[in-house]
Amino acid sequence: MTTFILHGGAVTDTSGINTKFFQEIAARIPDGGRMLCCYFANPGKIVSAHEYIVAQVSTCTDKHIIFEIADTDLAAFIQQMSRSDVIYFHGGTTALLLDALRSIENLAHYFKNKIVIGSSAGAYMLSRYYYSDRSHALGTGLNILPIKVLAHYTPEHDSELETLKAQGEQLETYALAEGEFVVIEK
């Protein structure tokens, strides 16, 4: 079974809104497990984001975890995914993430029996449809999950949420506030 964790964004917020999210990751990763962190959506902040993710997950457990940064060479990235227990897709610019991953044939195959995490743009990438608060537009993800997602949700986004719900076929729709997450097992 594959476990998907979709996160509403602002993963590097230091106010404590992400504590349960990092605890969820730490609880699910096996001791000695490998976590692959993909920053294709935010290439300018790889080092600072990665250091923060490593510190937060490590703080929540005494398990030994091997953290790895995704290679931008797609053949190497595919090999990294194959040997990882957890694949984490950091937020940022959704178009950059989609552009990087669209050419991977049968991407969902590499997610089988793993924990796949998508924060903001990462959640959008996994969905069939999404509404981007950044671009104020509907978008189409890679359809790994037949769902609709709106990250960074606040009540001020209710009209955008209704627009998303009306897009395409009727699917489960997730409106996730920053720091909020949902677990989907498939």
Image: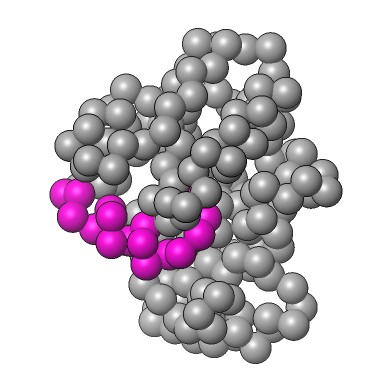
| Residue at left offset 74%, top offset 73% | 154
The quadrant of the image that shows the N terminus is top left
Note whether residue 46 is visible.
yes
In the displayed structure image, the side of residue 149 where residue 23 appears, left or right: right
- Location of residue 14 in the rendering, given as x and y in whole percent from the top left corner: 78, 46
- Location of residue 40 in the rendering, given as x and y in whole percent from the top left corner: 39, 51
Any magenta on residue 7? no
In the displayed structure image, the side of residue 25 where residue 115 appears, left or right: left
| Residue at left offset 38%, top offset 25% | 84
Q: Which colour assignment does the render follow?
A: one colour
| Residue at left offset 43%, top offset 27% | 68
Note whether residue 143 is visible.
no
Give the tally of numbered discs: 0
**Along the line of sight, the residue nearer the viewer: 135 or 84:** 135
| Residue at left offset 36%, top offset 36% | 70
**Along the line of sight, the residue nearer the viewer: 98 or 110:** 98
In the displayed structure image, the side of residue 90 where residue 23 appears, left or right: right
Q: Is residue 140 above or below residue 24?
A: below
Any magenta on residue 93? yes
Q: Quadrant of residue 151?
A: bottom right
The quadrant of the image that shows the C terminus is top left
Q: Quadrant of residue 169?
A: bottom left
Q: Is residue 94 above or below residue 27?
A: below
**Along the line of sight, the residue nearer the viewer: 185 or 72:** 72
> Which region shows up in magenta?
90-105
- Location of residue 21 in the rendering, given as x and y in whole percent from the top left corner: 68, 41
Q: Quadrant of residue 10?
A: bottom right
Q: Is residue 116 above or below residue 100?
A: above
